[in-house]
Image (spheres, helix red, strand yellow):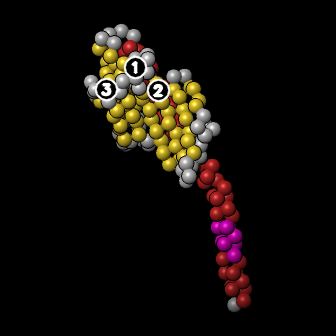
Amino acid sequence: MDRKAQVWIETVLYTVIILAIIAIVLSFALPKINSNKEKVIIEQSIEALKNLDRSINDAARQSGNQRIVEFSLKVGELTFDARDDREKISLKIDNLENLYSENGREIQNGNVVIVSNEGLNTNDITITLDYSGKLDIQYEGREEEVKINSADAPYSFSIENTNGIINITEA
């Protein structure tokens, strides 16, 4: 009888030790996994804005040009700011655990400007395409600020050059 009790105690003890080791490994691994996940999301967002920028610049080359671009917006908020002298397209991603770059410092990546902002509990990043002084951007024929929220399905935008005015509409 003593032998059976000893086997059960050893089994429970080994199980507890293994679970403790797994918990310790996960406590170190999960933050690194989440950090890498955020980095991938940010880098995909930068590439999506670069693709949008290429389509806008292609359409801007000649009046009458039109491009269709798919834009996947899984997280964040996309803003088309077509008000006078602003002419910006920006993507803001909130609730990040880590900064992508130094707090408040602008990083230029092609035509894309990236700024990380540190908050009290979470951080955010703003990725911007600035066309002020270069192109006249409108969203659905209006010169105003329009915000588009994240969605599971990708957005499809039509970009058309009409006499030097780049009109972006949801296709």
Residues packed near mark 1 inside 10 Å, few (<14), some (14 to 19) or many (20 plus): many
Q: CA distance from mark 3 to mark 1?
A: 16 Å
Q: Among all residues in the image, which is located at the extreme front?
A: 84
Separation of residues labelled 2 and 1 (CA atoms): 11 Å
Tell me the CA gap for discs 3 and 2: 16 Å
- At a point 29% along the width and 14% down the height, the residue shown is 162
Which residue is rendered at x = 46% and y = 24% of the image?
Answer: 130
> Quarter holding the N terminus?
bottom right
* Residue indicated by mark 2: 129
Q: Sequence-wise, which precedes: disc 3 or disc 1?
A: 1
The boundaries of the magenta stretch are 13-20
Give the residue at x 72% y 86%.
Answer: 3
Mark 2 residue crowding within 10 angstroms, few (<14) / some (14–19) / many (20+) = many
Q: Amino acid at mark 3?
A: Glu
Q: x, y (%) of residue 94?
A: 48, 45
Q: Which SS class for mark 2?
A: strand
Q: Are marks 2 and 1 in contact (CB under 8 Å)?
A: yes
